[in-house]
Image (cartoon, helix red, strand yellow):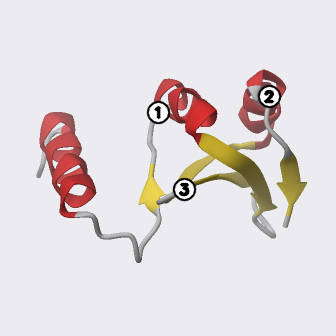
Amino acid sequence: MSSQGELKQKKALVFSEGDSKMPMEVFEEEEFLALVPLASVCYVKRVRDSDKVKLKLRTKKYLYTYVTDTADAQKVLGKINIPVEDI
């Protein structure tokens, strides 16, 4: 099994290779909020038959995705100062 540090290294490797075809997944709320100033819009996708919400940040180069529950998503959206669109 890989540790959290190894996952961050793999994510950094993908980021450095410049693979812009796949969205990047963010696992921490603080990391997601740190990317907000770089983004132009935040998309909100509510997963059917589930309590999960996908928050997607569109930056110039990447699409970042953060999966969370409904209550945490509302808290995060309250901290965002960019346009938010439901999809």
Give the residue number, with chain letter if any, for mark 3: 60
Q: Which residue occupies the foreground of this view, 1 or 38? A: 38
Circle nearer the N terminus (2, 3): 3
| Residue drawn at point x = 54 percent, y = 56 percent | 60
What amino acid type should be assigned to the residue bearing mark 3? Lys
Of the two numbered discs 2 and 3 in the rendering, the one whose residue sits closer to the viewer? 3
Give the residue number, with chain letter if any, for mark 2: 81
| Cα gap from disc 1 to disc 2, whole angstroms | 19 Å
| Cα gap from disc 2 to disc 3, whole angstroms | 17 Å
Of the two numbered discs 1 and 3 in the rendering, the one whose residue sits closer to the viewer? 3
What amino acid type should be assigned to the residue bearing mark 1? Glu
On the image, the x and y values in percent for residue 21 come to 41, 77
Q: Pointer 1: residues within 10 angstroms few (<14), some, or many (20+)?
A: few
Which label belongs to residue 28?
1
On the image, the x and y values in percent for residue 27 come to 44, 41
Give the vertical position of 46 relative to 73 (above or below).
below
Quadrant of the rendering where the C terminus is positioned: bottom right
